[in-house]
Amino acid sequence: MRSHRQAIKALLTASQVQVHSHHQSWRPSMRHWLIASRPRTLILAIAPVIAGFAFAFAQKGYLVWLTAIATLLSAAAIQIGTNLYNDAADFERGTDTPDRLGPPRAAAQGWFTSIQIRRAAHLMFLLAFLCGLILIIRGGWQILLLGLTAIAAGYAYTSGPRPIAYGPFGELYVLLFFGIAAVAGTYYLQVLQLNGAVILSGIAIGLPACAVLLVNNYRDFDTDRRAGRRTLCHILGRQRARLLYSVLLVLPVGLMMIIIKPPQHGLPLLLALPAALRLSYRLWRIKEGRGLNPLLGQTALYQAYLVALLCISLLWAHWLTVN
């Protein structure tokens, strides 16, 4: 009887150890996938979509919510998929070396194989496509073309024979897809038409996103050059890159002031200028190294702050119109 109880106790202990071990191995895996997805970059994907919603609401007074949710999910999935592809491709090309200055990458850290990361990227692109079906029903072939182009561009950013990220056109890619396409596409899906103000707003929203990439490439100036990259920072040089960064932060305020009618409704946008000047000063002061890592997140938050001020201005103008 005693031996029987001891056997049962041993079996239960072994089961608990196995469950605990499985739980312990599961938690780091999920945490590593979260890091690999780079959730902080989702600001860059979601902020322009919110701006498109604000323009649509200011015109119509309501949103088509199923379309709005599908738009947000699709934008987030494309962003995460692009991040994962970037992680795998940089590792395979040998770009992520031990002297890397940025945050840890999943493949380089050995958390997952590049094949596993690519499969996860495919899953994200599949989710974007499925959400895109809802958007295609709403917006027609134009949205189908935009979605396929966005997915192809996400793949081409760090894959293929001439990756966009390895050349001087990365900022242009960001302006097109994280600015113009995101804002105008979102607005079109709600209103089913476009206008010049929305296109100009897309440019304005995209410029701070370009600034995020510029800071990233500015920080990696030396390591990128050793890896064979020739980004816009290499063409401009460090000093002119710092000047461009300041322009990318300040110019959107002026563009948005032009868009908002009457101009006094755009006064909240002026609150962005002190933040733009502070960020510009930090780049001039820090200049290089890992000390620039916080500036990446701060620049992304600046874009979100700018979009929030734009929403306030548009909703203020809409409220005054209906009242």
Image: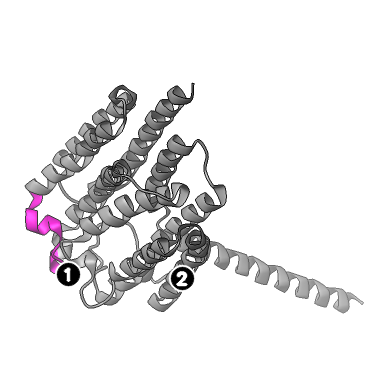
Residue tagged by mark 1? 227
Instruction: Tell me if I can see residue 102 in this picture.
Output: no
User: For this rendering, which residue is in front, 143 or 93?
Assistant: 143
The stretch in magenta equals 225-238
Horizontal relation, residue 81 to residue 281: left or right: right
Inspect the image, locate mark 2, and give the three-letter code of the amino acid beneath it. Ala
Sequence order check: which comes first, mark 1 or mark 2?
2
User: Image point 45% across, 47% down: which residue?
Assistant: 191
Residue tagged by mark 2? 120
Name the outermost residue toward the right. Answer: 1
User: Image point 56% across, 52% down: which residue?
Assistant: 66
Inspect the image, locate mark 1, and give the three-letter code of the amino acid beneath it. Ala
User: For this rendering, which residue is in front, 280 or 145?
Assistant: 145
Position of residue 160 measured from the top left corner of the image (x, y, whole percent): 26, 76
321 lies above or below 9? above
Instruction: Please tell me in which quadrant of the rendered image residue 274 appears.
Output: top left
Q: CA distance from mark 1 to mark 2?
A: 26 Å
* SS at badge 1: loop
Horizontal relation, residue 237 to residue 312: left or right: left
> Are the residues flagged by discs 1 and 2 in contact, CB closer than 8 Å?
no
